Image (spheres, rainbow, N blue to C red):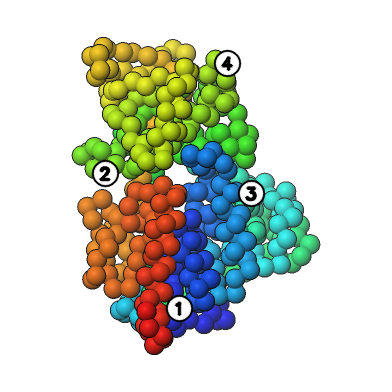
């Protein structure tokens, strides 16, 4: 990595999801030198794991493909994957960073032919599918992965599988001698775009996520419905593979709760409305959806989308905070609680229950490599004392894709002003 040249006129973007990619591309296309750092093996973040966006119901390939094309042809942008910022020192206009690089064990000769994957026998939980399926010890992270290069899992290094993978490669692309590396970078401004992670549903004990296979999270449901997902896009139950035609969604699963996440995660209502359409599309004749909610937050342009779901006779809205979930003899999750509009008690079985888990920042507030102002929910505050470290997208707040892209563009503009000043070109 000795070929990387960075200075106080460089912008470093930490995180290669939709927000990080947006900030990096906008700055690079304005002529700035940008280094994009992503801890995973490929770009895309959570957006790459979606089946469809709301409200247009188009696939992530829509936005991702355009961004990847922009990234491939921009000479101002350097991308480091399997990389993590471990230390940041300095001040606005003059930062020093230490970046830890993990070995991919696959070099740039890779053509993504897949022969190494065929040769390997060891399997591991597939992170891209939230552990609902397996992947090989030699793997391409996902269908749209960029860089379009395979990865050798570190767990097979030193085993026969690693040797088989190397022997199967016709292009001398597998380098089993790659080592961990630490590099030093300079930057005038840093954009922090490490994104979000779903709240741990295991902590919501009354809902039985840790005990019942047919209680899953909204992000897992998203992968379940994707043709590239663990079931090939078939809506079936994890426990027995039976068709899941009667599905319940529980809103605010861990959000707006002093025992879990205090904040509203904003996207959950729209995500469940979108996912209700998945169910109705999969089983248009007899698919049924029940949405248990405190209140539905679908504002502005999303109101029409909400109305279209309300008008669907196959979808029922129940105003209630579900008390708990039990399981019946047929392995059906059974929701128990009180309907707060009619104050009627219910004990209703479903084929599948989806928890609309909230968003929380991916980086713990105690794990940032430099002191910055972070609010009680773990999001970065727009504070002058942060210097030229700017949050982008859901690092700053719980935001949907559209608002994340807008926010990331604003972060790029702020960073550009700083490096322009450092270069003496004015704001």
Rounded to the nearest whole Å, what is the CA distance between mark 4 and mark 1? Answer: 56 Å
- In this picture, residue 416 sits left or right of residue 242: left
| Disc assigned to residue 143 | 3
Q: Earlier in the sequence, mark 3 or mark 4?
A: 3
| Disc assigned to residue 222 | none
Q: Residues within 10 Å of mark 3 (few under 14, many from 20)?
A: few
Where's residue 33, x and y in %? 50, 77
Please tell me whether residue 272 is drawn above or below residue 15 in the rendered image.
above
Instruction: State the image quarter where residue 193 is shown.
Output: bottom left
Give the residue drawn at x 54%, y 79%.
4
Q: Earlier in the sequence, mark 2 or mark 4?
A: 2
Q: Nearer the viewer, mark 1 or mark 3?
A: 1
- Residue position for label 4: 285
Rounded to the nearest whole Å, what is the CA distance between mark 3 and mark 2? Answer: 34 Å
Where's residue 10, x and y in %? 45, 78
Q: Earlier in the sequence, mark 1 or mark 3?
A: 1
- Residue position for label 1: 10
Rounded to the nearest whole Å, what is the CA distance between mark 2 and mark 4? Answer: 37 Å
CB contact under 8 Å: marks 2 and 4: no
- In this picture, residue 48 sits left or right of residue 341: right
């Amino acid at each position: 990595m000795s070929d990387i040249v960075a200075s106080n006129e460089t912008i470093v973007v930490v995180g290669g999801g939709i927000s990080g990619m947006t900030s990096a591309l906008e700055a690079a296309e304005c002529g700035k030198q940008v280094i994009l750092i992503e801890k995973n093996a490929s770009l895309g973040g959570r957006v790459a794991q979606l089946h469809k966006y709301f409200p247009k119901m188009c696939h992530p390939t829509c936005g991702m493909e355009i961004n990847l094309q922009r990234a491939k042809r921009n000479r101002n942008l350097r991308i480091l994957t399997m990389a993590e910022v471990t230390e940041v020192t300095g001040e606005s206009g003059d930062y020093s960073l230490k970046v830890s690089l993990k070995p991919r064990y696959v070099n740039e000769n890779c053509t993504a032919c897949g022969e190494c994957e065929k040769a390997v026998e060891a399997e591991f939980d597939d992170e891209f599918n939230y552990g609902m399926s397996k992947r090989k010890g030699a793997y391409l992270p996902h269908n749209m992965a960029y860089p379009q290069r395979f990865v050798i899992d570190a767990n097979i290094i030193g085993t026969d599988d690693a040797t088989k993978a190397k022997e199967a490669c016709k292009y001398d692309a597998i380098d089993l001698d790659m080592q961990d590396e630490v590099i030093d970078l300079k930057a005038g401004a840093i954009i922090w775009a490490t994104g979000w992670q779903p709240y741990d549903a295991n902590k919501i004990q009354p809902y039985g996520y840790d005990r019942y296979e047919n209680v899953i999270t909204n992000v897992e449901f998203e992968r379940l419905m994707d043709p590239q997902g663990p079931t090939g896009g078939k809506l079936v139950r994890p426990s027995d593979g039976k068709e899941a035609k009667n599905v319940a969604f529980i809103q605010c699963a861990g959000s707006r709760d002093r025992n879990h996440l205090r904040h509203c995660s904003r996207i959950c209502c729209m995500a469940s409305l979108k996912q209700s359409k998945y169910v109705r599309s999969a089983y248009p004749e007899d698919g049924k959806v029940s949405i248990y909610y405190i209140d539905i937050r679908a504002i502005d342009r999303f109101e029409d989308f909400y109305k279209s779901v309300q008008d669907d006779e196959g979808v029922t809205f129940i105003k209630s905070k579900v008390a708990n979930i039990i399981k019946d003899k047929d392995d059906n999750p059974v929701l128990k609680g009180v309907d707060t509009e009619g104050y009627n008690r219910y004990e209703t079985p479903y084929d599948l229950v989806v928890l609309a888990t909230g968003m929380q920042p991916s980086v713990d507030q105690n794990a940032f490599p430099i002191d910055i102002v972070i609010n009680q929910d773990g999001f970065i505050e727009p504070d002058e004392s942060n210097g030229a470290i700017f949050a982008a997208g859901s690092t700053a707040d719980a935001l949907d894709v559209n608002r994340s892209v807008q926010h990331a563009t604003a972060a790029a503009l702020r960073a550009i002003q700083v490096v322009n000043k450092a270069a003496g070109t004015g704001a």
